[in-house]
Image (tube, rainbow, N blue to C red):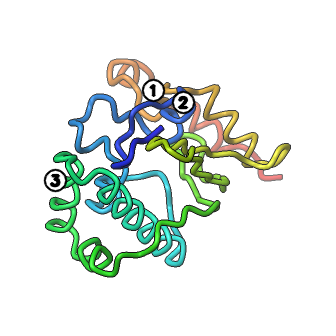
Amino acid sequence: VCDASWQRVAANDLAIALLGDFSGLPERKQNIAWRHFAGCPSPVQHTPEGLERFDRELVGDLHDATARHPDDARLRQLVADLREISPHFAALWEERPIAEQAASRKLVVHPQVGPMTLDCDVLTVRGSDLRLVVYTAAPGSDDARALALVGALGLQSFGQCVPEVLASHSLEPAADEFRGAPES
């Protein structure tokens, strides 16, 4: 769930496992628009067309938010900072694109599970500044199984081993067994 400035205000366990845990980061680095235009790492990969559409949607949405909340100093500062750090954001800001959130498909590359193509919907309620960002996969698909695996793994990390364990176990004898094995 994000607010009018695209500040992440809540995330369920699956969202955190899929997209990352921003809770320990400074507030600015928890903002989706900031992370996107500042070039922060993201598991979401965009096609060139999808990237341009996402850029325009974010900028248009921030324009709408500043019009609805002209006295919001935090929102105004976010826009000013984005214009300063991102020439692309600054150029789009001057264009004033229309904020039209459309359903999209996104490639999400999870560090343990790998790539999965997911549908992404941004749900809003008229009169509310909250956005619910929902990622789903087609039922029964490989992507649905991968997303379920992300949910089962949660925030566990299997990519790193404890150095003491590695030092106490030698893999050489096992490797020797395969060197002499007949080919089939």
Give me the disc on residue 183.
none
**What is the crowding at mark 2: few (fewer than 14 residues within 10 Å), some, or many (at least 20)?**
few
How many discs appear? Answer: 3
**What is the crowding at mark 1: few (fewer than 14 residues within 10 Å), some, or many (at least 20)?**
few
Contact check, label 2 and label 1, Cβ < 8 Å: yes
168 up-or-down from 9: above or below: above
69 up-or-down from 169: above or below: below
Image coordinates of residue 75 in percent, x first then y, are: 24, 50
Element at badge 3? helix
Per the image, the residue denoted by label 3 is 77
Question: Residue placed at 33% from the left, 24% from the top?
Answer: 163
Question: Residue placed at 57% from the left, 51% from the top?
Answer: 122
63 up-or-down from 163: above or below: below
Element at badge 1? loop
Question: Residue placed at 48% from the left, 37% from the top?
Answer: 1
Per the image, the residue denoted by label 2 is 173
* Amino acid under disc 2: Pro
